[in-house]
Image (spheres, rainbow, N blue to C red):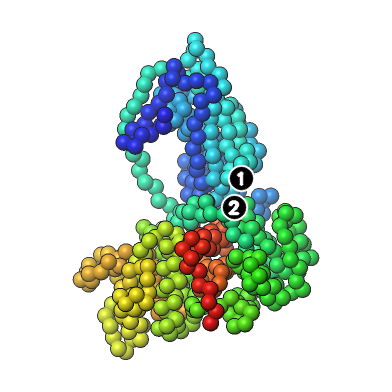
Amino acid sequence: MPATSDDGLIENRTFDEIRIGDQACLEKRLTMEDIKLFAIMSGDVNPAHVDDDFARSTRFQEVIAHGMWGGALISTVLGTQLPGPGTIYMGQTLSFHAPVNLGDVLKVCVRVTAKDEAKKQLDLECRCENQKGKVVIDGQAHVLAPTEKIRRPRTAMPEVRLAERGRLHEILSAADHPEPIVMAVVHPVDRESLLGAVAAAEHGLIVPLLVGPAGKIRAAADAAEVDIRDIEVIDTPHSHAAAEKAVALVREGRAASLMKGALHTDELMREVFKRESGLRTERCISHVMAFDVPTYPRPLFITDAAINIYPTLAHKRDIVQNVIELAQALGNADPKVAILSAVETINPKITSTLDAAALCKMAERGQITGGTLDGPLAFDNAVSEAAAEAKHIVSPVAGKADILVAPDLEAANMLMKQLTYLADATGAGIVLGARVPIVLTSRADEAITRMASCALALLLADHQQRQGAAPQQER
C-alpha cells in the first residue's frame, strides 16, 4: 500500500499488516540545493560538501553529499512508507561504501527481515544504490512499529528556494530514459574535459570516444586520477587533426554528437562548417543556452551568443526554428518565443523591430513551426507580466517567455553574462542546426553544467530520431 494516496493522504502499515520480506523504496536525485539545505539544517559546512574549489582538490574531485543525507532518506522511507506514520526509531547501523555525487539518483529501499511479536518491533535491512546499481550505503534499522491505523492529510511543507541549479537537474532527470549517445570528445587533454566526459558517461548520458593525442590524453587522465581504461581513445597528432577526425566519425556514423575539449571553438567549428567534409545542413547553425535563473519560474533559452554575429532575417528564421526544436525535445510542446529589441513597437530605424515583425508573420504563414512567437518585445516585457501589463501589451508571450531571441550576438552575449554574474544564473549550452548536436564547453564549467549540456544533446538527438526531424540535407 502506498504511503501517500492520490487524494493526498498519508497512511501507515500496522505491525499486524506487515510480513517478513515486505519492502518499500523511494528514488531521489542529489542536487546542490539538497546539499545546501542539509548543511543549513545540520551546521555541517565541511568544504568537501559546499566548496567547489576545495572539493576539486579532494580524491573525489567534486562536491559530494553528506553521508547522513542518505541516512535521512532511509528515515524518510521508514517514517512515511514502511511502517509509516507512528513508527518510532529504536536503532540504526550504517556503512558507507562510495560517495554520492551531484546528479546521482539514489534508490533507497528498506526490507523487513524480522518481527518481534511481543514487543511489536521490526528489523529492516536498509540499502541505498546509485543509478548504476552500486551500493553506496547499507545497514540495519530497528523500529517500534505502529499498532493502530493512521490515515491523515499529508502535511504541506513550505517551499524553499535557493539560488541553485534546479533546472539543470530537471534536464538530467529528463535524460534518464533514452539510451546514451555516442559522443566524440575532441582533444580532451586537460583535467576539465576528461572529468566532464567521464561524469557524463557514468551518468548514462554518453558513450565517449576520446579523440586526440593518446599520450597527452592518458597523461591528463593520470594527473586527474581519472580511469579511462574502458573508454576508446582515437589517436591523432594534434588538436586540428582531432577536430577533423571527430567530424569524420560523425559522417561515418560512428558518433552521434560532438563535445569540445581543450581546443578553441573556432578550430572545431571550422571543420564543422566545411562544405564538402563538414556537418552543415540546410539550416543555419546556431548556439543556445538553457538557463536556470533562480528568480524566473521556468527554464529560459537564449540564442544566439556564440555563432552568428549579425544574423540576417533568413538566419534568424533558422535560429528560431532550432531553439523551438530544442525546447520541444525537453517536453515543451508549444514554447513561447520572444523576439527581443530595445522597444516593443515597430520602428523602421531599428532593424531588429522589423525583423521581429517579419518573423512573427513567417510563423503565421507556416515558415516557422512548433512555437508561439511575438515581437518586438523589450526584455522587461518578455519576462515580466507586470511590465507587459503596465504597457498594455496583450500577448500570449509577453511576461511568460520560454525563449529569448536576441537581435545579434553582442546583445545575446551581454544578456547571458548579466544573468550569470548578476542574477546567479547557470546555463547549459549546445550548438544546433548541424547534422548532430555539438556541446561547447568552457574551462570554467562545473561538472553539473557539462553533464546538463550532454543531456541536452542526448534529448535533442532522441527527439529528432523519434520525430524524423534531424536536418540532413547539406547546403
| Above/below status of 233 relative to 243 | above
Q: Residue furthest top?
A: 118
Residue under numbered circle 2: 204
Look at 43% across and 64% down and name the residue there.
327
Q: What SS does tag 2 mark?
A: loop
> Left or right of 295: which side holds 216?
right
Packing grade of label 2 (10 A; few <14, some 14-19, many >=20) is some
What quarter of the picture does the N terminus occupy? top left
- In percent of width and height, residue 262 lies at 66, 69
- In percent of width and height, residue 426 lies at 48, 62
Which of the 4 image quarters holds residue 152? top left
- In percent of width and height, residue 11 lies at 37, 28
Residue 412 appears in the figure: no
Residue under numbered circle 1: 132
| Above/below status of 52 relative to 46 | below
Asked whether the beta carbons under mark 1 and mark 2 sit within 8 Å of each other, the answer is yes
Q: What SS does tag 1 mark?
A: loop
Residue 161 appears in the figure: yes
Which of the 4 image quarters holds residue 158? top left
Give the amino acid at mark 2: Gly
Look at 52% across and 68% down and name the residue there.
430
Q: Residue furthest bottom?
A: 349
Look at 44% across and 81% down and name the residue there.
315
> Left or right of 258: which side holds 84?
left
Pick the residue in front: 135 or 409: 135
Pick the residue in front: 148 or 24: 24
| Above/below status of 15 relative to 424 | above
- In percent of width and height, residue 291 lies at 45, 63
Q: Residue furthest right?
A: 215
